[in-house]
């Protein structure tokens, strides 16, 4: 049990983190001020599965200012316990803690859904998938989805199963450029440096996936002097990487060369047994995708002779042939799951969450006229958020 003094300290620490974040999220502050006046979400319950950290707390406070009852859970390994405590102290219902694994995560999702939300805000499609399995759509207005991973699941595995509109935030060109490329790109590289304390220049990185997130990771690594090889099954993405001046190869051809392998695909089963078996001694594995499923963790755990935790965020798997394979942050998102990992920069998430809040407002007003199923952020929402951010960035000299 956590004693009362510890909880009080956690709340105070969490509130300071939220305050610093909030004063640097100008787009959400502007929306919050409007919501306080008009209360467009009055009486609605919003169920959320987003990373519980300071920037998400500011989004929750914005929705609450609009009159919504906000219920949230996070993702395994990414919840900031002090932030969760601070959010709960301000009347936001939070399920989950940093130590939760996959099983606890699914239980937390069920706890959120038991509040019968009218709007779902999801990150990886976990909340939406569980809703479809266990509930009918009575009272549900619509959903939003934040990620590439979630969008893939919604459009492929769950195609045609939606009785309501789902706005895919990841489809927004604003999110793809500002949050994915510059937010994820910067913070994954920061996460590697912070976790390992290793040099980036001259190190041989293999970036698997050259979508908007992978592009950002590769470009930020290269800007620091890394030797970057890109792997992507899509020839168009590979051609783009080549024209960007990066080495492009098949994953099989990088195994004896690469020192650090970073998955950024949003899809399962990317680095498998046959790949791990051919990597050099000391190879480092990291993941930037939403789920750890991109790396075959089951094989690593079952086939290693010994597993040693070298730090809170570095595990060493000594294989039967004596090779050592290093895994960062248990294969969870390198920029969020690590000790002290802050996720994407505040300003990039200000834009992403402004898209979220604006899309929720659009759903409330327009859901009856919208098509069901996954769809891009409405054009008028993109234009308004882009214009507001441009004003924030284009201050006169």
Image: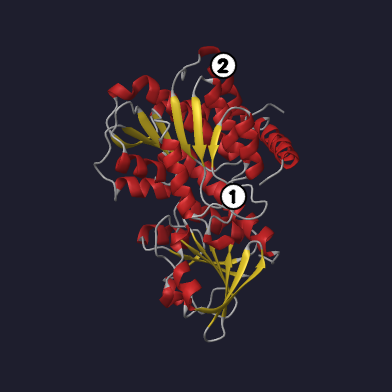
Residue 106 relative to residue 17: left or right? left
74 or 377, nearer to the observer: 74
In the rendered image, which residue does mark 1 sit on? Answer: 98
Visible residue check, residue 142: yes
Tally of marks: 2
Q: CA distance from mark 1 to mark 2?
A: 31 Å
User: Whole-percent x and y of residue 60?
Assistant: 55, 31
Q: Quadrant of residue 219?
A: bottom right
Mark 1 crowdedness (10 Å alpha carbons): few <14, some 14-19, many ≥20: some
Q: Quadrant of residue 233?
A: bottom left
Mark 2 crowdedness (10 Å alpha carbons): few <14, some 14-19, many ≥20: some
Residue that sits furthest to the left in the current view: 160
In the rendered image, which residue does mark 2 sit on? Answer: 36
Determine the residue positioned at 46% across, 20% down. Answer: 41
Mark 2 or mark 1, which is nearer the start of the sequence? 2
User: Whole-percent x and y of residue 282?
Assistant: 60, 77
Determine the residue positioned at 39% across, 60% down. Answer: 268
User: Whole-percent x and y of residue 170?
Assistant: 43, 42
| Vertical comparison of 225 with 396: above or below | below
| Vertical comparison of 84 with 332: above or below | above
Label 1 close to label 2 by CB (< 8 Å): no
Q: Secondary structure at mark 2?
A: helix
Q: Quadrant of residue 349?
A: top right
């Amino acid at each position: 049990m956590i004693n009362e003094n510890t909880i009080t300290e956690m709340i105070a620490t969490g509130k300071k983190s939220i305050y610093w974040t909030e004063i640097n999220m100008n787009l959400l502050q502007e929306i919050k001020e409007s919501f306080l006046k008009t209360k467009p979400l009055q009486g609605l319950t919003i169920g959320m599965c987003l990373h519980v950290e300071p920037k998400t707390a500011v989004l929750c406070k914005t929705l609450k200012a609009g009159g919504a009852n906000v219920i949230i859970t996070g993702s395994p390994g990414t919840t900031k316990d002090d932030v969760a405590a601070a959010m709960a102290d301000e009347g936001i219902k939070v399920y989950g803690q940093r130590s939760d694994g996959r099983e606890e995560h699914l239980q937390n999702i069920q706890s959120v859904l038991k509040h019968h939300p009218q709007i779902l805000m999801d990150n990886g499609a976990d909340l939406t998938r569980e809703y479809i399995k266990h509930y009918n759509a009575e009272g549900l207005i619509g959903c939003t989805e934040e990620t590439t991973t979630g969008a893939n699941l919604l459009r492929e595995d769950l195609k045609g199963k939606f009785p309501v509109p789902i706005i895919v935030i990841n489809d927004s060109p604003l999110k793809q450029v500002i949050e994915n490329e510059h937010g994820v790109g910067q913070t994954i590289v920061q996460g590697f440096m912070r976790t390992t304390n290793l040099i980036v220049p001259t190190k041989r990185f293999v970036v698997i996936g050259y979508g908007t997130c992978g592009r950002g990771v590769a470009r930020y690594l290269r800007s620091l002097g890394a030797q970057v090889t890109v792997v992507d099954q899509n020839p168009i993405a590979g051609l783009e990487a080549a024209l960007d001046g990066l080495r492009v190869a098949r994953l099989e051809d990088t195994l004896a060369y690469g020192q650090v392998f970073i998955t950024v695909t949003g899809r399962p089963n990317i680095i498998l047994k046959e790949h791990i078996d051919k990597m050099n001694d000391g190879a480092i594995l990291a993941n930037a995708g939403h789920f750890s499923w991109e790396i075959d963790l089951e094989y690593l755990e079952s086939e290693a002779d010994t597993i040693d935790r070298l730090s809170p965020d570095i595990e060493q798997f000594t294989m039967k042939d004596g090779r050592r394979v290093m895994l960062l942050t248990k294969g969870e998102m390198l920029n969020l799951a690590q000790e002290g990992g802050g996720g994407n920069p505040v300003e990039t998430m200000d834009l992403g969450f402004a898209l979220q809040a604006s899309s929720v407002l659009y759903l409330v007003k327009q859901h009856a006229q919208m098509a069901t199923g996954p769809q891009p952020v409405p054009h008028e929402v993109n234009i308004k958020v882009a214009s507001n951010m441009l004003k924030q960035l284009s201050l006169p000299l």
